[in-house]
Every structure is written in structure tokens, then in C-alpha cells.
Image (spheres, grey):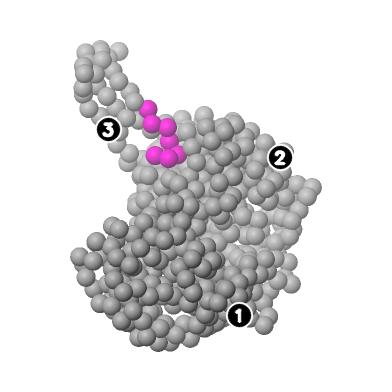
């Protein structure tokens, strides 16, 4: 079994299939965004054979796992949640080195969210009450059936938490799972499999296959035995997976990024709005839910910009393990080049860089950047950058604000600052987004629906919505008067 030391933590670099570690001849490098010269691991690079092996295991394990029922499965999911809580520090150490999210944030809130995911979905599944009624001479009930083997493909940002967010409802619903973590940050998901083994899950119920999306990911989603696919990533990749899912008639949910508007009305608490806008640079701006298009009412533009500059100046670029750091590096040199490419093309287009706009002299950090575009059609307005880059536009009227907010192909989230409850409800209903926050940001309820409109994705995760997706609904009708026995 191949293991490596990551920040003092022993991490397996192999797949986890059918309850055991499985190696591959081919490997791929994983390096730390904190220091690109630091190679963390050579990780098993799966392909068609590993994908087939994992689906074989999930298919074989499915009948027994489904037959346990929600109460039986809850025992395993709660046991796994307890183990996550006991290993928060270890997981946070590895994930910080692997993808560079602030270690303090990982320790205090992000990793423990994984435990809450498993407990919450285990409870929701156990608490499910079927709809029952009588009509047309029959007694009727709507029942959930486990759908079958499920493939989950997760992104490189917050990989541990986002993997549990998808896998917990799939497992709670009675499905077996094959998880494919992102190749840029696979190590914390490997730690999750150590905890799955420690929780004594039946072999084949929960598997991890590592590798490149175009290799093992493509093989996983193309297997006709898969009955659910859940993906988070780019619209381009989501479209490819969706076509494959459609060919096999497999239900598919996708969260595909965002370009959220951050609308500030003149009656808002400008200090609070500017302070929250500066939060959009957190985690290097690598947050799909961030409000990256600042839309500010023209009468308070100067005041807002002044306070935004102040709060942005308080950010500290540095080592994500340091508690004083607030701005982490980007995940990969290729991603740094992508983000800087957007900024340089914006300059060439005539867009004005209000502040920032440069990579750090060394490392993978990028300055907090605000761009004033020449038009709403500018590339930096219309496309997701996924870095610490915001655009800034003004509006005169509420109608104009709504029109600008709805002017991109995305629709994942939106942020609105206003003192008016009436405006909050009116504009909140008009803005096209899966989630709209008013005078707050990133307040999450695990029972609430989460997902996007437009090219931000299809389907909804969260609460009963996720459990319904991972289930097949059955209509049971029994003629009245049928005797027991």
C-alpha cells in the first residue's frame, strides 16, 4: 500500500475500491499551491480498468446497502460523522497543503461541515414520511426507492466538504457511491476513505477512484450501470457529462459555477456592504457563490469605492497556515495564468483596472483586483474568472439594477444590500439566481435547495431535494378492502 507524509499526516496515494486500497501503474503529481516546488505526492492515476472495478464493486454492494433501510444506514453515516469530528485537525492540515484554503477556516468551520452533512442526511432519510391518501377506491402511498450505483465528481475547491455534501445524501438514500475527486486536490478525499474503512462500511458501498477527468472520469460516467451522476465543475465539462448521461438515460445534476451580482442600493448600509464585498476576495476568489459583479447605485458610488478600497487593503497575502493570512494563493500555475489572462485582456479591451491587477512576484498569489469595464459585454463581466477579480458597474434605477443582474448566462447566486424590506422581496424575486442573499452572504441551511439557473447548472442539492434526486419514486396503490395476511 502506497502512503506519503503530508504535513506530518500519513495519506494513502492509492484508490479505495471494494473496501481496500488499489494501486495503479501510472501516477500523477500533486504539488502544494503554497510552494509549487513542494511535491506532496505521486497519486494513483486510474483509467478504464479502475473505473470498471469500482463500478463492479458498487453494483455488487448495492442490494445489501439498499436493503438496510434508512435506519440501518444511519448507523454507518453517524459513525463516519463522529470520525470526521475526531479528525478535523488532521484533515485540515492536509487540505490546506493540498489546495491552500486558509487552515484556520478549514479547522473552525469547513471540515466539520462534512460531519454535519452525514448526520443531517441520515436523519432526513430516516424521517421521511411517504405521502399517503385514498382515492378512486385505492389506498395510495409515494415511496422512495434507492436509485443504484452513483458517480460523484467534485471540484478542487473545498474538496472534502463538497464531496461529503454530494455523497452523504446519495448514501443516505440507499445508493452506493464512486467518488472521483479533482486531480489538483485529491488528498483529503483519500483521508475520508480511511475513515470509511474505520467506520466499517460494507465493501463496495463507498469508493474513491483518482485520476484525470478525461480518463477515469469519462469512463465512470459512461458506464451504463451507473444510475445517478452528480458533478460540480465548468459548464463545458458539465455539458459533455450531460450528453453522456442522456445517452444512458441517467438522471444528472450539475453545479457549474457562477458570476453572481452584488447589488448595492443607495439606502443600504454602505459600510457593511463594502466590508462584505471585500470578503469576495477570500480564498483567492475561488468561490463559485461569490458576488463578483459589483452593481452600485450611482449616488453612493464614490462612498462605496472609498470603503471598498479600505477593507480590501486589510487583506494579507501569505501562507494559508498562518492565522494572520486572509488571502490564499491560487490552486495551480495554470489557473494563475488563466486569471491573469482575463485581466490582461481586459486592459487590452480598454477596461480600467481600479486597483490590483497583478500576480505576486513569487508564488501563486494574485492581487485583489477591481475592474471597471467599458461595457456590460466585456469578457470580464460575462465570464467566470474564479479568482480575486471583481467588476464594478453603476446603475441609476431599480429596473436597471435588475437588468444588469440578469444580463449574464449564469444564475447561481446573488447578493443584495438595501434597507428596504419591500425592495428586498421585490428585487429578490426578480433576480434570476438559485440563491439570493439580502444583507448577508453564505448563510447556509442544509435543508434548503441549492443549485443554479442558466449555465450555472441543473437540478437542486440540499435537504429533501437531494434525497429525491438520489431516489426513484414509486407509486403504490392497493385496492380498498384488500385483506391482511
Point out the stretch of residues depicted in magenta: 468-474
* Residue at the image point whose x is 28% and y is 78% from the top: 266
Q: Residues within 10 Å of mark 3 (few under 14, many from 20)?
A: few
The residue at which mark 2 appears reads as 48
Q: Is residue 420 above or below residue 436?
A: below
Front: mark 1 or 2: 1
Name which quarter of the figure residue 38 lies in: bottom right
Q: Is residue 379 above or below residue 187?
A: below
Q: Classify residue 399 as left or right of residue 100.
A: left
Q: Nearer the viewer, residue 118 or 147?
A: 147
* Residue at the image point whose x is 35% and y is 73% from the top: 395
The residue at which mark 3 appears reads as 131
Q: Position of residue 23 (x, y in %)?
A: 74, 47
Marks 3,1: beta carbons within 8 A: no
Q: CA distance from mark 3 to mark 1?
A: 57 Å
Q: CA distance from mark 1 to mark 2?
A: 41 Å
Disc 1 element: loop
Q: Nearer the viewer, residue 113 or 79?
A: 113
Amino acid at each position: 500500500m502506497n502512503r506519503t507524509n503530508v504535513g506530518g499526516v500519513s495519506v494513502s496515494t492509492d484508490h479505495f475500491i471494494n473496501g481496500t486500497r488499489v494501486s495503479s501503474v501510472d501516477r500523477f503529481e500533486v504539488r502544494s499551491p503554497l510552494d509549487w516546488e513542494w511535491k506532496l505526492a505521486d497519486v494513483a492515476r486510474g483509467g478504464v480498468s479502475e473505473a470498471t472495478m469500482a463500478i463492479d464493486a458498487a453494483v455488487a454492494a448495492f442490494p445489501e446497502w439498499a436493503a438496510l433501510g434508512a435506519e440501518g444506514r444511519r448507523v454507518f453515516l453517524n459513525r463516519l460523522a463522529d470520525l470526521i469530528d475526531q479528525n478535523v485537525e488532521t484533515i485540515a492540515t492536509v487540505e490546506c497543503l493540498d489546495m491552500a484554503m486558509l487552515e484556520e477556516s478549514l479547522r473552525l468551520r469547513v471540515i466539520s461541515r462534512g460531519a454535519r452533512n452525514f448526520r443531517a442526511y441520515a436523519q432526513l432519510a430516516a424521517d421521511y414520511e411517504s405521502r399517503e391518501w385514498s382515492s378512486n377506491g385505492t389506498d395510495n402511498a409515494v415511496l422512495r426507492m434507492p436509485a443504484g450505483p452513483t458517480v460523484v465528481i467534485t471540484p478542487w475547491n473545498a474538496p472534502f466538504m463538497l464531496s461529503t455534501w454530494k455523497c452523504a445524501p446519495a448514501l443516505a438514500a440507499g445508493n452506493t457511491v464512486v467518488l472521483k475527486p479533482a486531480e489538483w486536490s485529491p488528498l483529503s478525499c483519500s483521508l475520508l476513505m480511511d475513515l470509511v474503512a474505520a467506520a466499517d462500511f460494507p465493501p463496495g458501498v463507498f469508493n474513491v477512484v483518482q485520476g484525470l477527468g478525461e480518463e477515469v472520469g469519462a469512463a465512470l460516467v459512461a458506464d451504463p450501470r451507473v444510475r445517478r451522476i452528480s458533478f460540480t465543475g465548468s459548464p463545458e465539462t458539465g455539458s459533455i457529462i450531460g450528453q453522456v448521461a442522456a445517452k444512458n438515460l441517467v438522471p444528472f445534476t450539475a453545479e457549474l459555477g457562477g458570476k453572481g451580482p452584488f447589488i448595492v442600493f443607495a439606502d443600504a448600509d454602505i459600510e457593511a456592504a463594502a466590508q462584505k464585498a471585500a470578503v469576495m476576495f477570500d480564498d483567492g476568489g475561488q468561490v463559485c457563490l461569490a458576488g463578483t459583479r459589483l452593481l452600485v447605485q450611482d449616488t453612493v458610488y464614490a462612498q462605496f469605492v472609498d470603503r471598498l478600497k479600505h477593507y480590501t487593503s486589510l487583506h494579507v497575502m501569505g501562507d494559508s497556515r498562518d492565522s494572520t493570512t486572509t488571502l490564499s494563493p491560487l490552486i495551480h500555475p495554470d489557473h494563475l495564468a488563466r486569471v491573469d489572462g482575463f485581466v490582461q485582456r481586459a486592459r487590452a479591451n480598454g477596461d480600467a483596472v481600479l486597483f490590483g491587477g497583478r500576480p505576486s512576484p513569487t508564488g501563486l498569489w494574485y492581487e485583489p483586483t477591481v475592474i471597471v469595464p467599458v461595457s456590460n459585454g466585456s469578457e470580464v463581466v460575462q465570464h467566470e474568472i474564479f479568482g480575486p477579480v471583481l467588476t464594478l458597474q453603476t446603475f441609476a434605477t431599480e429596473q436597471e439594477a435588475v437588468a444588469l443582474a440578469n444580463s449574464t448566462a449564469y444564475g447561481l447566486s446573488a447578493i443584495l444590500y438595501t434597507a428596504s424590506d419591500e425592495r428586498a422581496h421585490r428585487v429578490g424575486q426578480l433576480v434570476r439566481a438559485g440563491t439570493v442573499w439580502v444583507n448577508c452572504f453564505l448563510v447556509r441551511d442544509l435543508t434548503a435547495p441549492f443549485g443554479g439557473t442558466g449555465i450555472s447548472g441543473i437540478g437542486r442539492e440540499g435537504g429533501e431535494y437531494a434525497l429525491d434526486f438520489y431516489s426513484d419514486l414509486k407509486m403504490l396503490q392497493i385496492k380498498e378492502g384488500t385483506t391482511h395476511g
